[in-house]
Image (tube, rainbow, N blue to C red):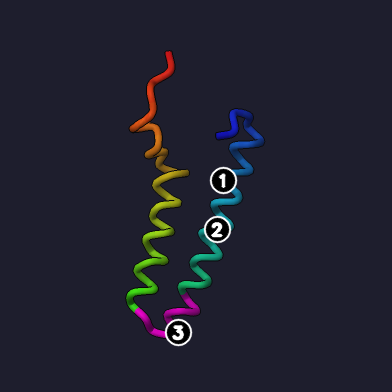
Amino acid sequence: MGNTKSGIYRIGIVVLVALAALTGIEYIVAVTFNSAAVLFLIALAKAALVLQYFMHVYRLWSEEEH
């Protein structure tokens, strides 16, 4: 993970763009294919991004720094 403030902002922007892209893909799949399985997989990917980068779940399994 980037330790600098600009690196953290860059990661946030990349995740934001990825979530926006996945939402666009989700809309297209919902309108065109109407496939619940694909929509569920996209929702899982979006949830994983939110958990990893915005909720910082990865810190639960890392050793604490003192």
Task: Report crowding for label 2: few under 14, some 14 to 19, many 20 or more residues within 10 A (C-alpha).
Answer: some
Residue that numbered label 3 is attached to: 31
Numbered disc 3: secondary structure: helix
Quarter of the image where one finds residue 56: top left
Give the position of the C terminus as an image quadrant. Answer: top left
Which label is found at residue 45? none
Quarter of the image where one finds residue 47: bottom left
Q: Earlier in the sequence, mark 3 or mark 2?
A: 2
- Write down the region rendered in magenta: 27-35
For the residues bearing labels 3 and 2, Cβ distance under 8 angstroms: no
Marks 2/1: CA–CA distance = 10 Å
Numbered disc 2: secondary structure: helix
Name above or below for residue 34 compared with residue 48: below
Extreme-right residue of the structure: 6
Q: Earlier in the sequence, mark 3 or mark 1?
A: 1
Residue that numbered label 1 is attached to: 12
Q: Position of residue 40 (x, y in %)?
A: 34, 69
Give the position of the N terminus as an image quadrant. Answer: top right
Task: Report crowding for label 1: few under 14, some 14 to 19, many 20 or more residues within 10 A (C-alpha).
Answer: some
Q: The disc labelled 2 sits on which kind of residue?
A: Ala
